[in-house]
């Protein structure tokens, strides 16, 4: 062993209590950092999963237009009093061509048309407002993986039954219906139609479960008294959801329609997530930093206590950088012990939390061992530790032995 | 020329705090190889200040210092540290051992730092040095469990470990009783006579000085008699 490391080791073990306190500080900071950040990743993942059960990565649609002045020259000289939304419908013209073009993009995994219809679910006297989503069953299942959150019935039956409907568990409960029952839908165009309930889903997002139902695309078009070319939305899934906003821009430019990424669609939710991320990052970093201060304090104390030792070492030929190495080694060793302990501690906490049942839309605590967060925590922990040692070590290195010997 | 191991040329030193004050005035002298030199003088006459300059730890002076025919004035701090490690051994008035290490380890540290020979061999040599100083049985005790005189001797053993060209001591027997002073003196004299070791020691002890090869007397920052 190198003599600098040897001296550092002696200092670490000659003051076991201080070393233990500093290492314990790092241990706590480290475990809280890893645990909180893993928890955040888990929350985000479970939230995204829940979002993607009812939202595509990108939605291509036609925006409502406000009536505008028709005069071409100097439109600013004219004014429309009380402008209204142009009474055109939101249909996408030539949807097949657009679907084909979008499919050719290499980032795109699924493209599927969709027609949403506002409806009333009627069962006897009870009536609730809802949304019937007209889908192509195969593609929609690829996109939302609906069959995975079906609680009753078989999703595949929707393909063969034009009068079939899959309703949310909330709707089923409120209407007091179950699989095999009939349910009557009234569309916004006044069309009435009976459906046979072939399945019930539970997406764990109560807003969706209480309102939505899935029907065939063509049935949905009939509810709106439209032909089979009537499409309001084209939904797109891509390989990496994080790129949704960029690709949406590209699709908008390509098709001439509006394209909106899922983050934009869920703006409010995303803002809340961002805030959560900021708070967790801030808190966990602060805790690590406080642990760093612990090491800094103890190193500072050691340097003050050992000022005679430092003077002797310099007198017998240790250089400034040797002195720095001694104290940085001490700090980094303490930090390392704390980091290892913290990693173990975090793993235990996560293991325990995984077995905690939260209930509600979440179920079991959504936390996993996030390797990236472990590495990040270890990296930041060692970085802070290094500086917490380096600053006092530099002070030690600049000790003038003569001024110490004179005292 | 061959036999001059340390030489100063016109060394001056000033302190500026609290007022400008010249501690050392035009100090020029030479030390021969194997010489046992003592420095005496009234308190405040500048002995320690001069010794710190000779030891290369204090670099804030004017004039020139040669050690082993090499001009050390103006060398970098790191170079000076290397030079001290290899060529100079120190014994201070207040023992200045590393408390948390055993006596043996204290003696070994300068050699481990130098890194010229294997640790195993260093350990053997450190034992040897401690034996010369009559401390072989104390080798594995923590250094702060030793008496003052014993600690002083461990410090001498440490100064010897790298077989330095020069041993410097600032009142190496300063806080010892007469019996221990004699022991320290005998050891230094033995080193000088039988091992050809060069020694520069600051002392207040007239008897101690008389027994050395040569005595320099300092007076108000000047050398009175060489
Ligand atoms: N850091 C300093 N700043 C200002 N003056 C100093 C400083 N160190 C020493 N002096 C002064 O320099 C002079 C010489 O001090 P030095 O320690 O060399 O004396 P000395 O001969 O070793 O005395 P003693 O025998 O008491 O050890 C003294 O007058 C002292 O007050
Ligand atoms: Mg003095």
Image: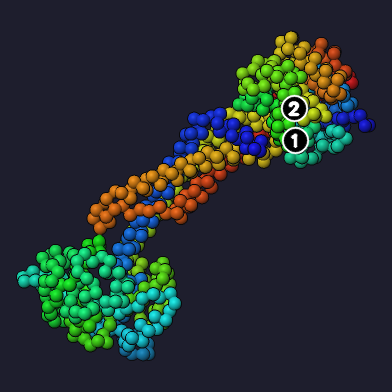
Q: Is residue A184 above or below residue B20?
A: below
At which x and y percent is residue B36? Answer: 85, 20
Residue A32 point in image, percent of width and height: 41, 45
Q: Residue at x 80, y 40 (%)?
A: B74
Provide the residue designation for mark 2: B125
The answer to whether residue A200 is above or below residue B45 is: below
Quadrant in which residue A243 is drawn: bottom left
Q: Which mark is residue B117?
A: 1
Q: On the rendered image, what quadrant is the N terminus of chain B found in?
A: top right
Q: Nearer the viewer, residue B139 or A384?
A: B139
Image quadrant holding the C terminus of chain B, namely top right
Q: Which secondary structure lies at badge 2? A: helix
Crowd rating for badge 1 (residues with CA inside 10 Å; few <14, some 14–19, many 20+): few
What subunit carries mark 1? B
Q: Is residue A402 visible?
A: no
Query: Does label 2 point to a residue whose CB lies under 8 Å from ligand 2?
Result: no
Do we see residue B117 in this rendering? yes
Q: Quadrant of residue B208?
A: top right
In this view, B147 is above or below A324: above
Query: A72 or B102, which is in the foreground?
Result: B102
């Amino acid at each position: 062993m190198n003599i600098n490391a040897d001296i550092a080791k002696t200092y670490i073990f000659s003051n076991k209590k201080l070393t233990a306190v500093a290492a314990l500080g790092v241990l706590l900071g480290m475990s809280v950092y890893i645990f909180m950040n893993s928890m955040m990743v888990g929350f985000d993942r479970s939230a995204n999963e829940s979002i993607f059960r009812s939202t595509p990565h990108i939605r291509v649609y036609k925006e409502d237009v406000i009536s505008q002045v028709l005069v071409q020259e100097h439109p600013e000289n004219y004014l429309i009093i009380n402008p209204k939304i142009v009474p055109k419908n939101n249909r996408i013209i030539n949807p097949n061509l657009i679907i084909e073009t979008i499919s050719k993009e290499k980032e795109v995994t699924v493209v599927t048309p969709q027609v949403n219809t506002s409806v009333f679910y009627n069962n006897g006297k009870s009536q609730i407002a809802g949304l019937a989503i007209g889908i192509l069953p195969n593609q929609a299942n690829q996109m939302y993986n609906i069959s995975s959150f079906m609680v009753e019935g078989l999703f595949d039956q929707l393909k063969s039954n034009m009068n079939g409907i899959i309703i949310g568990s909330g709707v089923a409960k409120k209407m007091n219906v179950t699989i095999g029952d009939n349910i009557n839908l009234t569309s916004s165009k006044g069309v009435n139609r009976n459906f046979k309930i072939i399945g019930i889903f539970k997406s764990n997002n109560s807003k969706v479960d209480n309102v939505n139902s899935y029907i065939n695309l063509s049935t949905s078009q009939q509810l709106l008294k439209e032909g089979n070319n009537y499409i309001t939305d084209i939904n797109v899934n891509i390989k990496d959801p994080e790129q949704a906003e960029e690709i949406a821009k590209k699709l908008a430019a390509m098709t001439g329609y509006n394209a909106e990424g899922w983050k934009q669609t869920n703006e409010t939710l995303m803002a809340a997530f961002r805030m959560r991320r900021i708070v967790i990052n801030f808190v966990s970093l602060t805790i690590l930093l406080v642990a760093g201060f612990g090491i800094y304090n103890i190193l500072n104390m050691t340097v003050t206590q050992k000022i005679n030792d430092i003077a002797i070492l310099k007198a017998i030929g240790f250089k400034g950088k040797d002195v720095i190495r001694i104290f940085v080694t001490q700090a980094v060793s303490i930090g390392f012990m704390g980091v290892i302990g913290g990693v173990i501690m975090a793993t235990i906490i996560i293991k325990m939390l995984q077995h905690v049942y939260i209930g509600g839309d979440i179920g079991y605590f959504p936390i996993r061992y996030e390797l990236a967060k472990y590495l990040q925590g270890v990296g930041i922990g060692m970085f802070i530790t290094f500086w917490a040692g380096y600053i006092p070590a530099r002070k030690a290195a600049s000790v003038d032995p003569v001024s110490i010997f004179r005292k | 020329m061959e036999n001059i191991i340390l030489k100063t040329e016109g060394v001056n030193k000033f302190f500026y705090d609290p007022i400008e004050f010249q501690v050392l005035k035009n100090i020029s002298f030479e030390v021969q190889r194997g010489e046992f030199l003592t420095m005496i003088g009234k308190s405040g006459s500048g002995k320690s200040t001069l010794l710190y300059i000779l030891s290369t730890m204090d670099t804030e002076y004017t004039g020139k210092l040669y050690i082993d025919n090499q001009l050390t004035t103006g060398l970098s701090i790191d170079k000076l540290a290397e030079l001290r490690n290899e060529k100079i051994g120190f014994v201070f008035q207040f023992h200045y051992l590393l408390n948390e290490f055993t006596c043996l380890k204290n003696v070994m540290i300068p050699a481990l730092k130098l890194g010229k020979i294997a640790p195993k061999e260093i350990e053997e040599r450190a034992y040897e040095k401690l034996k010369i100083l009559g401390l072989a049985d104390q080798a594995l005790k923590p250094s702060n469990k030793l008496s003052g005189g014993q600690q002083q001797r461990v410090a001498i053993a440490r100064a010897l470990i790298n077989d330095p060209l020069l041993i410097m001591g600032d009142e190496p027997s300063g806080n010892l009783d007469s019996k221990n002073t004699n022991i320290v003196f005998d050891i230094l004299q033995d080193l000088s006579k039988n091992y050809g070791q060069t020694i520069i020691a600051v002392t207040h002890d007239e008897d101690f000085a008389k027994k050395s090869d040569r005595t320099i007397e300092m007076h108000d920052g000047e050398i009175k008699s060489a």
